[in-house]
Image (cartoon, helix red, strand yellow):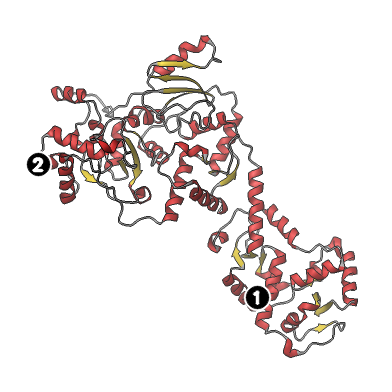
Amino acid sequence: MDPQSAAEIGRLSPEAIQQVKREAWPQPRSADELHDALTITGFIAEDEIPAADLEPWYGLLAELQRRQRATRLSLGAEMLWVAAERLLAVRSIFPDHEMAPVIEALPADEAASRETAVTEIIRSRLESLGPVTLSRLTRAGGLSTGDVEQALRMLEQEGFVIQGHFDPRQHELEWCERGLLARIHRYTLKRLRSEIEPVSPADFMRFLFNWQGLDEPSQGVAALERVMQQLEGVSLAAASWEEEILPARLQPYFSSELDQLCASGKLAWLRRLPADAKESRRKNPAVKSTPLAFIFRSNLALWCQRESELPQGLSATASKVLEVLEQWGASFFDDLQQQTGLLKTQLENALGELVAWGLVNSDQFQGLRAMIRPEKSRRRSRRRPPLQAPLASGGRWSLIRAPLQQADEGQRVEQIARVLLTRYGVVFRKLLERESGLPTWRELLYCLRRLEARGEIRGGRFVQGFAGEHFALPEAVSLLREVRRRSDAEELITLSSADPLNLTGIITPGRRIAAQAGHRILYRDGKPIAINQAGEITIDDAVPASEHWHIKNLLTRRQHPANYHKPQQGPLF
């Protein structure tokens, strides 16, 4: 943790601060231990001795004084006790003050310089006091404010001391030795983690359904934008976005709102992950199963780190369209047709192929929506007015290029970690098994630890049965507790197997259910109890037969149709 980040920590536990202060302050049981304490602390003022320990301390100090291992320095009304080994430094700081005549006078030329002596004494004091204010340092020993400030600045440059507001009850700026601050922080994290009782996997699934809005779908463009922030970077089958994923979170869902976000320049769709070896051996136009992701344009540098390489199996028509886009830039469908001289169907197939390779996209989603419709539906739409926007009205098509200014790797990992926290609320290694194209868990782990150190997120063990470190947003921790209290909710949630929250075999026990459009899973209180795979419904044996009809109805009924146009307001004439 760098000094700036450490200085910004504002959520340290007062109990942890007091505990470290008690541990750092001497608690001698013998004269030798007290002598060591005087050597380490530089000096100890009599008013710093705990009231409950005055009698045993004075007995030990008197013994050290008789053995000439310590002396008493009088500073007016204040009395300091100093070990013999620190006498030179202390005398160079207070040359005009009276010293008990137990230790013989020392040669003045052996005394260290005053500046160095003050710095070393302040260093020793900080090792025993924990977070301390400037006024406290100057009050004990009668050191001047200027001398102490100069010493603190020198120690700060060394990285020995860190300044900040550590104790929430203290308004004055504090200084703390780095090692003690790290210990306070560890105690704070330990206390915070001990406050959190892990939930069961079923309760965690209920939390995720609530976190992503499947239990209470929202509506409107603002709600769609929040959903897209949670699902940013997730690669899903192209058709599943509007057929299953978005309608499950937004009711009613209007595809025109998605076009609005894309056309406004906020959101971009693209194939983020490269085609696999099997796809690269043949022409592969964009179809319903082509994996596509949505990314906010401001974050393209985080997700697109390099230029897409041209595949060897690119068709001649696709290569021709690619050359025109490279030369003319973003172009409408009709402009591309004029520049390439291709037939409409040829251009449609060429664009579909380039989309499937992850080389092009358009500034609206309706072009892709028309592209992935079955050919039979396209022919039918030519014979009568289309209900869906045709490919020609799909906005401008352009090449997908990596941003000119690449994101710093550390910044990229941190932003992706924040996206994952936004998506799941709670993040741990097992949960990310279905994710692809992410930084390694090691990189994410170090980043999440830094966020925890800053007090932005919480660390601990939030879900039972999963090893390793867990990290959560503070609001997610509160929601987890609330979900756990609602143990008898009897919540029924139907989910597409293509949904990112299909975590069967990962979070919930049992076999994994493949992510495939059209297949659905029914959860009761976070536990999968029935599956619909290609029309074949399998129901858990523990479910009573009297509930089978209702379960089959839920698995076969579409949650909500994907409307392509908002209803017009007012009477039609």
**Judging from the image, what secondary structure is the residue with disc 1 in?**
helix
Please identify the residue farthest to the top as the structure is shown.
546
Q: Closer to the camera, 317 or 102?
A: 317
Q: Amino acid at mark 1?
A: Val
Quarter of the image with the N terminus in it: bottom right
**Rendered image: mark on residue 491:** none
Q: Quadrant of residue 376?
A: top left
List x then y, in percent, for residue 145. 65, 76
Relative to 412, residue 174 above or below: below
**Rendered image: mark on residue 148:** 1
Q: Seen in the image, is 3 located left or right of residue 353?
A: right
Q: Amino acid at mark 2?
A: Gln
For image coordinates 55% across by 63% down, the residue present is 3
Q: Quadrant of residue 82?
A: bottom right
Distance Cα–Cα, label 1 vs label 2: 78 Å
Q: Seen in the image, is 400 located left or right of residue 480?
A: left
Q: Closer to the camera, 76 or 246?
A: 246
For image coordinates 83% across by 64% down, the residue present is 28
List x then y, in percent, for residue 186. 64, 53
For image coordinates 28% across by 47% down, the residue present is 308
Number of marks present in the image shown: 2
Quarter of the image with the C terminus in it: top left
Between disc 1 and disc 2, the foreground one is: 2
**Residue to which mark 2 is pinned:** 338
Q: Closer to the camera, 328 or 156?
A: 328
